[in-house]
Image: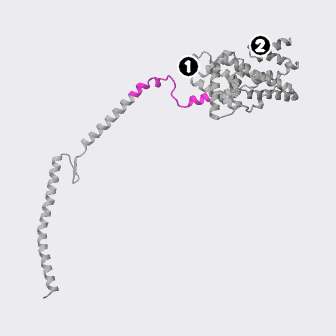
């Protein structure tokens, strides 16, 4: 596989890989570095990439492992970490923007409270829209584990949202 | 849209039983309806977040540039390319290298032997004498000559001894006349 083939097949995955890395490392620069390193690892294996059936799932799995390695090496504590404030917000009026930012920041805080595995599975499903089978491949777990973790993550978010609503937050 | 259908899908979603199509439907529904009854509105931030996170977190062309730069830098560093002729011939080249090394050692040893054979065996009076027997004879005659000269010298030393004894006797009688 030459660079042109690689850039046509692998490079378009960059955003999915980046968001997945961001879900784990909670820092844009680190997530970008993780994706660069993953691409480089894939590039080194370019001769055998043609034999891989699901290159996307394989790449996502590499990102996951790269992120976990990053945590092991840096001793970074993600639980209750610092979500990037720039991740929030869409183009609406300043008042609505503030309100929306605050609501989205609230969800981000809830995400940060989820255990790592639940958060990863949740984002793979609800943001990247992967099937249970694909998530199981990426996470290297059974489909039943994917379903249980997804259910727990959503249940937690629902409870927190309803609690916030009840307290008028 | 009937809110009851959305409520049903929402229930399926929260209990982890919804399909991907239904989940997509929920996101589209919240994006299309800015105002909803409180029981549906309370989940808006969640679905807004899902859409917002996806649209806002993308990598731009700078990432591609960095990536291509990294690959080109790596390609420029001297490394043996895979499946190159050099790599394929590596075992043969290794044997050839060992063969050349042995040839070198053999040539070196032979050269030393030749030099030793060519080198003059002895140098006497600035004259090169290759025949060891002849050199031995010359050395032997030289040493014999030296020995002869030393013996001749010894004869004269005897006279000196006699002279020494006599002078001692004279000195004694002078110091002690009685």
Of A146 and B138, the residue lying toward us: A146
Q: In the structure shown, which secondary structural element does the residue marked by tag 2 occupy?
A: helix
Q: In the structure shown, which secondary structural element does the residue marked by tag 1 occupy?
A: helix
CB of mark 1 within 8 Å of CB of mark 2? no
Q: Which residues are magenta?
A: B69-95
Of A38 and A146, the residue lying toward us: A146
Q: Is residue A18 magenta?
A: no
Quarter of the image with the C terminus of chain B in it: bottom left
Q: How many residues crowd mark 2 within 10 Å: few (<14), some (14–19), many (20+)?
A: some
Q: Position of residue A136 (x, y in %)?
A: 65, 18
Dot 2 falls on which chain?
B
What's the mark number on residue B6?
A: none
Of A91 and A153, the residue lying toward us: A153
What's the mark number on residue B22?
A: 2
In space, the residues marked 1 and 2 are separated at their CA atoms by 37 Å
Quarter of the image with the N terminus of chain B in it: top right
What's the mark number on residue A48?
A: 1
């Amino acid at each position: 596989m030459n660079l042109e083939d690689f850039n046509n097949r692998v490079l378009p995955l960059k955003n999915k890989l980046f968001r997945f890395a961001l879900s784990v490392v909670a820092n844009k620069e680190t997530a970008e570095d993780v994706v660069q390193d993953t691409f480089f690892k894939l590039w080194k294996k370019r001769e055998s990439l043609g034999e891989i059936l699901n290159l996307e799932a394989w790449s996502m799995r590499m990102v996951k492992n790269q992120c976990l390695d990053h945590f092991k090496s840096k001793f970074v504590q993600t639980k209750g970490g610092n979500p990037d404030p720039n991740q929030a917000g869409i183009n609406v009026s300043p008042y609505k923007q503030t309100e929306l930012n605050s609501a989205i920041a609230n969800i981000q805080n809830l995400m940060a409270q989820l255990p790592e595995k639940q958060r990863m599975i949740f984002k793979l499903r609800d943001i990247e829209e992967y099937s249970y089978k694909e998530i199981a491949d990426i996470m290297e777990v059974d489909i039943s584990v994917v379903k249980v973790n997804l259910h727990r993550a959503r249940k937690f978010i629902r409870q927190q949202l309803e609690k916030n609503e009840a307290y008028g937050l | 849209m009937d809110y009851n259908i959305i409520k049903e899908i929402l229930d399926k979603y929260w209990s982890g039983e919804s399909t991907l199509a239904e989940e997509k439907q929920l996101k589209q529904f919240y994006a299309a309806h800015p105002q909803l009854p409180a029981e549906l509105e309370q989940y808006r931030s969640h679905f807004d977040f899902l859409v917002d996170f996806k649209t806002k977190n993308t990598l731009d062309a700078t990432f591609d540039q960095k990536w291509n730069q990294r690959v080109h830098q790596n390609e420029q560093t001297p490394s043996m390319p895979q499946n190159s002729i050099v790599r394929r011939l590596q075992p043969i080249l290794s044997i050839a290298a060992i063969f050349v090394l042995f040839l070198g050692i053999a040539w070196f040893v032979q050269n030393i032997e030749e030099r030793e054979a060519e080198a003059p065996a002895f140098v006497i009076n600035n004259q090169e004498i290759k025949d060891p027997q002849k050199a031995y004879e010359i050395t032997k005659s030289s040493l014999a000559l030296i020995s002869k000269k030393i013996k001749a010298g010894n004869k004269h030393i005897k006279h000196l001894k006699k002279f020494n004894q006599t002078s001692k006797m004279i000195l004694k009688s002078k110091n002690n006349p009685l």
